[in-house]
Amino acid sequence: MSYNTFGRLFRFTTWGESHGEAIGCVVDGVPPGIALSEKDIQPYLDKRKPGQSRFTTQRQEGDVVKILSGVFEGKTTGTPVSLLIHNEDQRSRDYDSIKDKVRPGHADYTYWQKYGHYDYRGSGRASARETAMRVAAGAVARKILGKNISIRGALVQMGVESIDRDSWDWKEVNKNPFWCPDKKTAALWEKYLDSIRKKGSSVGAVIEVVAEGVPAGWGAPIYGKLDSDLASAMMSINAVKGVEIGEGMNAATLMGHENADVMRMKKGKATFQSNHAGGILGGISSGQPVVVRFAVKPTSSILMPVKTVDKHGKDTDIQTKGRHDPCVGIRAVPVGEAMMACVLADHMLLHRAQCG
Amino acid sequence: MSYNTFGRLFRFTTWGESHGEAIGCVVDGVPPGIALSEKDIQPYLDKRKPGQSRFTTQRQEGDVVKILSGVFEGKTTGTPVSLLIHNEDQRSRDYDSIKDKVRPGHADYTYWQKYGHYDYRGSGRASARETAMRVAAGAVARKILGKNISIRGALVQMGVESIDRDSWDWKEVNKNPFWCPDKKTAALWEKYLDSIRKKGSSVGAVIEVVAEGVPAGWGAPIYGKLDSDLASAMMSINAVKGVEIGEGMNAATLMGHENADVMRMKKGKATFQSNHAGGILGGISSGQPVVVRFAVKPTSSILMPVKTVDKHGKDTDIQTKGRHDPCVGIRAVPVGEAMMACVLADHMLLHRAQCG
Amino acid sequence: MSYNTFGRLFRFTTWGESHGEAIGCVVDGVPPGIALSEKDIQPYLDKRKPGQSRFTTQRQEGDVVKILSGVFEGKTTGTPVSLLIHNEDQRSRDYDSIKDKVRPGHADYTYWQKYGHYDYRGSGRASARETAMRVAAGAVARKILGKNISIRGALVQMGVESIDRDSWDWKEVNKNPFWCPDKKTAALWEKYLDSIRKKGSSVGAVIEVVAEGVPAGWGAPIYGKLDSDLASAMMSINAVKGVEIGEGMNAATLMGHENADVMRMKKGKATFQSNHAGGILGGISSGQPVVVRFAVKPTSSILMPVKTVDKHGKDTDIQTKGRHDPCVGIRAVPVGEAMMACVLADHMLLHRAQCG
Amino acid sequence: MSYNTFGRLFRFTTWGESHGEAIGCVVDGVPPGIALSEKDIQPYLDKRKPGQSRFTTQRQEGDVVKILSGVFEGKTTGTPVSLLIHNEDQRSRDYDSIKDKVRPGHADYTYWQKYGHYDYRGSGRASARETAMRVAAGAVARKILGKNISIRGALVQMGVESIDRDSWDWKEVNKNPFWCPDKKTAALWEKYLDSIRKKGSSVGAVIEVVAEGVPAGWGAPIYGKLDSDLASAMMSINAVKGVEIGEGMNAATLMGHENADVMRMKKGKATFQSNHAGGILGGISSGQPVVVRFAVKPTSSILMPVKTVDKHGKDTDIQTKGRHDPCVGIRAVPVGEAMMACVLADHMLLHRAQCG
C-alpha cells in the first residue's frame, strides 16, 4: 500500500478533491470474465450518498458512476477498471470566509504544515468525498468475492447510546436513516441526534461490519495479517480513531478461560462454540464470521464557534457554515462495508496465489 | 507491506520459528553513516526477554543479537542490516503431548487450514518469539529517528484494573515488572496477576505508546496515513485485538465541541490546547505527541483444561504445560514501542522523499 | 511495480483501451508546490501524436490532455494528479473482419490464452495508445526533475540503416519526421521507409535516449538499480525486444582495458575520460550522461497477408487494413524519453529519502 | 521490487558483503508443502562456485548453504525460508593497497558518491558474491515451478567469438569450463581466454537462457510484463549491460513479414512456426520457449595498470591483484538461469492469483 493506492493484488488508486471537477479511481487486479456494469456499483453509492435525510449533509450529489475501461461486452477483461463520478454541488463560496482559518479537528493544519500549499475548499483531498470511490471499489470487490460471502454493516453506537445487541435484526438496518439494527434504539437516536444538531454540535459513533462465508485460511503472517490489513483499512477512513476485531479493546478485561473459543466436532466438522476472536486467529480467517468495529469521532465542522488560529498567526474563532453531517458515522457504514470487501478480495487473491 | 516484510522505505523482513535454530531479520533502507552496533540493540531485547520475573514465561533465552551485514567500521553503509539471534531453550518435547490437538485461541487451526502442514512446536512462526526481531528492528529505527524523538510505552490496564492516569509517572515504568507508570496500581497488579496465575488462567491488558518530538507533517493521505500504518503495525503484534489513536473508541461518545482540540497562538506558535486527536489529523502528524493504545487478549495457552478437537476429528481436552506468560501484554510493551519507532522511521523517510 | 502501476515513490497508474471512451493515468507521489498545467504536458503529447506524417498511422487524435485533480491555483498539492484524454477517432469497424483471427506478433493470442475474453478492437489495452499516458506522466516527471536535467531521444537505426554517429546533431532531431540526429541519414530513411511501406511491410528501429545533468548517486543496489529499472521501463514499451546501457550488447566483445572508463582529476574534479558504462556503475549514476538504447520490432500489423489461425481452430490468412505505423519505432522516441524521465524522478525521490 | 528485495509474490531479500562474516537471503511467498532440503539447492551453488578452473577466480569458497527456517519435516511451511552461507576465504589484505583508489568500472566511485562511506573490501555489497544468494533463491523457485518447466543457460559468445548455433548441443554444456553448447567453440575459447588472461586483461560474454514448458498466459500488462521483469532481473546482475528477448536488438533490422511468427493448426493445436518473439507477446508468455540473452562486460579488475584517481583527489594508477575472473560471464550462466526461475515463479503465482 502506498499513498493513494490500496491493496496488494486487488488494488485501487483514488484521486480527486471535494471541490474539483470529478473524483475517480482505478481498480487493478480484477480477475477476467466477471460480469460488471454500473448497475452493480450504483446501489452502494446511493447508500452512501449525501442529502438523504436531515441527519446527513445537505450537499446534493447524484454520485452517478461511470465505467471508463476494463469492461468489454459486459465482462471484466482483467485490465484496469477506471471509475469516475462528476462533482455537481460544490458550493466553494461557502469556504471563502474561512479559507485562512485552521479548522480544529480537520486536516487543514497538517496539510498546511506538510505541503505548504493546499486546497481549502471542503478539505480538498482530505474530504470524506473520497470515500465515494472506496464504495465504488468495494462494489467491484463484492463481485470478485461472489455471492457466498455476505458483508453487512450497522451503526451500533451513537454518542453515549448503544444498541441492545439482543434486539439485533439485520432487516431493520435498511428501515431507518441510521443503518441501525435495533428498532427501538433507532427511534431513540432520532431524538438524540436532533437535539445535538439543534445545539449546533455533532456526535461520534461506532460501526460494526460482519463478513459471513469467508472460508478458513485467508490472511498471511506476519505483516500481511487479515486483521492487520482490516485495521489499516478501517483506520484509513476519515475520522476513525479506533478499530476492534472480535472482542476488541474488551479483550483486555477477560481471562484466558473466558476468552477461549472452545471447539467441538459437529456433524463431522470442527466447530467453534463462540467467536471472541472475531473470525481471525494468527492473522488468518478461521471460517467464523469476521467481525470488525470502528469508532468515528464527531464531525469537526460544527455551527458552534470554536477557538482557533489563522494562517497569519492570529487567534480567531471559527464557525463552519458549510453543509455537514451531524453524525458522520452514519455515512461511514457503507464505507466500512466497502473496505471489508476490498480487504477480503485482496486476501482471496493472495491466498489463491500462494496456496492454489 | 507484504507477508513477512514490514514498511515501504524503512523495511524489515523477519524469519524463523520459535523452535528452529535461529530467528532473524533483514533491515533495509537504512540511511548510511549512522553509528550502529549490537550495543544499540541489545538493551531493547533485554527489556523484552522472557524469564525476568515470575510474571513472564520461564523460557530462558539470552537473546543475544548479532549484526551480520550492513555496518562497516561502526557505521551503517546504506545496505541491508542482517540481524540474527540463536534460539537456545527450545524444549520441543513440551509440545509432544499436544501436537495433534488444536489449541483454542492459537493459530494452530488456521495454519492447518491454510497450509495443510505446520510447525506445531511452540506455534512455529506464529509464536510471539518473532517479536524479538521487531524489537531489534525498532532499535535500528530509533537510531534513524535520532535523539529528538522519544518513544515510550507503558501498561495502562491489566484485566479489569486500569491505572490512575493522574498518577502517571514515567520514572515508575522501569521500577516494576509490568512497565506500569503508576506505583500504586503496580502493587495491586502484583497480587491480581498472582491470583490469576495460580488459578491456571491468564489475563488481557492495554498498552499505551507515546512518541514525543515528532514534527508536524509526517504521514500521507489516503492509504499511507500515519494512523492507518500504526493501526496495521500494532494489530500485527500477536494477540492484539484493538487499536486506538488518541481518544480511540471513546471518540464515539463525544460531541464535536468536546472533541475539538482548540488552538491558540503561544509565543508566536500555533498551539493545541488538548490532544484528543492523539497527534494525528487527516493521517498526518500535527506536532503533538502521537498516542497509540492497543489491547492484548489473555494468553491462550493456559493450565486450565479447555475443550477442543484434534486433527483426527475427535473431541478432546487440552491443557498447556509449556512455559507461558500469564499476561502476555507485559512483554508487548517493548514490542509496541518498537513498532511505533519503525512506523515513524518509515514515514520520516517517506516525508523526506516527497517534501524534501 | 505491479500490473498497471509504474514506480515506487513517483508512481503512475494507467488505464484505458485503444477503442474505449478515454484513456488516463493517475500520477502519485508528486512533490507539492510545483507549477503544473496542461501546457507543460501537451507539447510532449503532440510530439507522440499519430497522423503527423505519412510515416505514422493516419489515425487522427487530438490527444488533448486534461488535469482533473492534484493541482490547485496552478501548483501541485502533493495529492494524485489525474490526467485524461478522450479517444476520438476509433474506427472500430476496421477490426470487424479480423475479430476472430489471431494477429501474429500481437498480444491477441496471449490475451486470449490468459484472460479468455479480450477487447479485439485495436488491441484494446495492448495497443500502443497506452503510451500516450506514459508521455503525459513523463512530462510531470520532467517538472520534478527540474531544468538542470535534460532528457533527449533520437532514432539511431531504422532497419539495416544506422546513423553516422560522427554527424550527430541534436538540432536536426526536430527537423525531420524520424527524430533523426543525422541529416543525411534522415534523407536516406525517407526513401527506405517509403519503399517498405509500399511493399506493404514494416521495419524495426533503435532509439537512443540520453539524460544529461543527472548527479552521481542516484540508484540503489541490488534490485533497485537504476539500470535495472531503466531496462524494465524500456522493455515495458510496446514492441521493444532489447535494451542496452552504454556499450550494451557490444560490451561482450570488448576486453577489460578497452572497456575501462579511466579517470583523471580535471579542475579539482574526478572526471571520466569515456563513457562505456553509459553513466551507471553498480546500479548507481556516476554523474556522466545516462545512455539507454532500445530496439523496437517491426510493426506486426502489415498489409501483406500473413498465415495465422482463428479462434475456431482453422488455418487462415490475415491482412491488417487498420491504420498502422510502417515503423512504430519513430513514435517510440518520445515514449522512451518519458520513461527515462519517470525512472529518474522515482530515483531522485528514493535517493532523497535514504540519503537526505 | 525495492532495494534488496526481488519479486512481488515470490520474493527474496539478499544481504551480506563479500568480506563480511556471511551472506544470506530470505525467500518469502513459497507455497506450502513443497519438499525442500539443502540438497535441492547445493548443486546450483556448486555450479556457480569460484575456483573450479583456471578460467574463474581462485578464491576458494565451499559455499555450503544452510536452511534456517521455513521448512518443517522436509517440507516448506509457507513461511519465510532463510538461507545462509558463511564466507570462508576473504583475503581482505589483498585490498589494503587499493583501498583509497577508485577502481574504474567498479561501483567504488558511485557508492562513495551516494553513501559517503562504503566497504572497499572486494566491493562489499557490490561484489558478484551476492549472486550466490540469487542462485540459492533460484533453486527454491525451480521447486515451485516443478519438473515440467526446464531452465537452461549457455554461454553463446565470448569476446568476438560466437558459437555456431547449428552445432548447439545441450549435452556439451556441462562438459567444458565455459557452459558452451558447441564443442568446437569451447576448444577455441580455451586458447582465446588463455591469451587474454596472460595479457592481464579480461573479456566480455553473452549468455542465453531458455525456459521450456512455460504455459501460455503468464505475465501481466502493462508494468508487470514478463519481458519487462526479465529485463530488470537480468540487468540487475553484476556487469550486465544489455538484455534481449527473442530477436533482441536484431529485431530492429527486420521487416514485418520476416519477423512474423506465423501460426498453423497442428494436431488440433495452434502452433507457431518460428520464435522471433522469444516466447512472449504483449508481455505474456505464448507457450513457446522463453528466450533471453544478456551481455556481460569484461571484468573491470585487471592486472594491467589502469589510470584512475584516489579519494584524496590525486591522479594515480591501479592494478588489481585480487583474485578475479578473466571472463566473469562464465559464472553468470547459473545466475541467469536462477533469475529466469525466480521471475517465472513470481509470475506463476501472480497468474494463479488473478486467473485462478
Image (spheres, coloured by chain):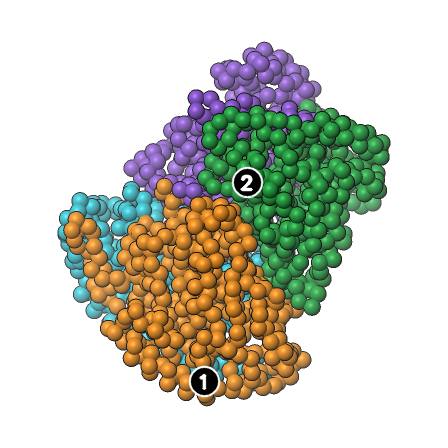
Chain colours: A purple, B green, C cyan, D orange
Q: Viewed as shown, does residue C311 lie left or right of C63?
A: left
Which residue is nearer to you in this view: D161 or D108?
D161
User: Is residue B307 something that shows in the picture?
Assistant: yes
Res D307 → quadrant = bottom right
Chain under callout 1: D
Query: Around disc 2, counting alpha carbons within 10 Å, would you say few (fewer than 14), some (14 to 19), or many (20 or more)?
Result: many
- In the drawing, does residue C189 fall left or right of residue A331? left
Nearer to me, B254 or C131: B254
Which numbered dot is residue D197?
1
Identify the residue under disc 2. B120
- Residue A271 in the image: state x and y as whole percent: 50, 25
Q: Residue at position x 49%, y 47% from top?
A: D73
Which image quadrant: the C terminus of chain C?
A: bottom right
Residue D116 image offset from top left, x and y in percent: 65, 69
Q: Which residue type carries mark 1?
A: Arg
Label drawn at residue D296: none
Of labels 2 and 1, the one closer to you: 2
Closer to the camera in the image, B59 or D294: B59
The residue depicted at 61 percent of the width and 85 percent of the height is D315
- Residue C3, image x, y percentages: 42, 49
Callout 1 environment at 10 Å: few (<14), some (14 to 19), or many (20+)?
some
For label 1, the SS is helix
The answer to whether residue C122 is above or below residue A250 is below
